[in-house]
Image (cartoon, grey):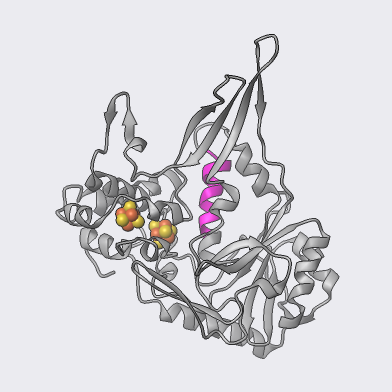
Amino acid sequence: MHKDSPQTTHATPLFLPRARLQDLIDALHGAGYRCVGPTPKDGAIVFDTLHSAAQLPAGLQDEQEPGRYRLHAGGGVRQFAWANGPQALKPLLFAPREVLWRATRRPDGSLAFDEALPREKPLAVFGVRSCDLAALAILDRHFLQQAHGAYVDPYYAQRREGLFLVAVNCSHPAATCFCASTGDGPRAGGGFDLALDELDDGFVLECGSERARTIVGAIRLAPAARGQTDAAQQQSRQAQQRMTRSLPGRNLRDALFANLEHARWNDVADRCLSCGNCTSVCPTCFCHGERDWQQIDGAQSEHVREWDSCFTKGHSYIHGLTVRPDTRTRYRQWLTHKLGSWHDQFGRSGCVGCGRCIAWCPVGIDITEEAAAICGGKP
Ligand code: SF4
Ligand code: SF4
């Protein structure tokens, strides 16, 4: 990880007036970052290159329910009065599709192999949520600190090295959010460079790293007033109280493995389309496949890594046998790994309570409901 990787900080919070948000974007540009932030596009809030604060989704709010995501006006002057869009940080670090290496045939017939490492500017991401930071910590463990051996994924590591994170504490959780029940929100506890609490007239700002202090020092901000920091804390408490969904426990490993033949697996299989939307939007799912693409003249071949999903037939294909041939076993694999054996691998559940898999499932399957039906307890 970067030598100046973010830590939790207890420094005095500052206040960034809304009209000066552009100063922060400009300061990051000046320090050599490409800025990315939430922007409305095709009816959803997605990350895009951020040149101006005017691109942020001012006044927009989201309405999320199982199988439903809609944007509407109602957020007043606020630019972050919504919960989350279909993306987290995952696609910015672990590309949905990327070339890992190329093989080229030389004139003498021998082959040259070239690693295709990403050569991108360091990235500053605005609008990172606390659940996204929790998911990032899991991805870091997977890609940078493999338990068996010292393999570090160089493609992920290269992008992670330059990442500057501007978190925004959630003030408007969606009906699908349950990060309070997983212990991952709605306030960011650490792992950010800057954390903002949005109020009507601006942002209470907390620095979490030395590089953030350098950036913020250049734009000269006054300390936040006591009333502003109190309002920010109160807003977080209210956000937490508004969450109605929860998982029936933080560690469902034993309950899930004791119920591998539960009738609910058949019930959910009757509804599930095996489309894999849930794994695409999940900020912690990291399964992928690799394949080679050859040019028809045999001059060059590209070795490509693409996201895969435990819902595809090919994902469990081994030597002429598909281990999980039906939706029942694929959904069971997803849930028992995500909420069960993930504890053995990572010491925690693979769910950070973002609710994306609920909203973006085309048939509205709700992980909290399924877990409660199988493990007991209320969703
Ligand atoms: S399993 Fe669903 S709610 Fe949990 S982190 Fe993944 S997308 Fe979010
Ligand atoms: S649970 Fe929903 S999103 Fe996931 S594979 Fe099944 S139908 Fe698709």
Residue closest to the far bottom = 227
Please name whichever residue, 154 or 297, is drawn nearer the observer in this view of the structure: 297
Residue closest to the far top = 108
287 relative to 218 in the view: left or right: left
User: At 24% from the left edge and 67% from the top edge, which residue is drawn?
Assistant: 377
Residue 192 counted in the magenta span: no
In the rendered image of this protein, does residue 81 appear above or below residue 336?
Answer: below
Q: Position of residue 233 (x, y in %)?
A: 57, 82
In the rendered image of this protein, does residue 373 appear above or below residue 223?
Answer: above
In the rendered image of this protein, does residue 317 appear above or below residue 111?
Answer: below
Please name whichever residue, 161 or 81, is drawn nearer the observer in this view of the structure: 81
Residue 138 counted in the magenta span: yes
User: At 49% from the left edge and 81% from the top edge, which residue is drawn?
Assistant: 237
Residues in magenta, as a range: 134-146
Q: Position of residue 209 (x, y in %)?
A: 72, 61
308 relative to 14 in the view: left or right: left
- Determine the image quadrant of residue 278: bottom left
User: At 39% from the left edge and 49% from the top edge, which residue is drawn?
Assistant: 343
Q: Residue 150, can we see it?
A: yes
Q: Principal SS element in the magenta part?
A: helix
Residue closest to the far left = 263
Q: Position of residue 67 (x, y in %)?
A: 34, 66
User: At 19% from the left edge and 51% from the top edge, which residue is drawn?
Assistant: 259
Q: Position of residue 287 (x, y in %)?
A: 44, 42
Ligand 2 quadrant assignment: bottom left
- Determine the image quadrant of residue 219: bottom right
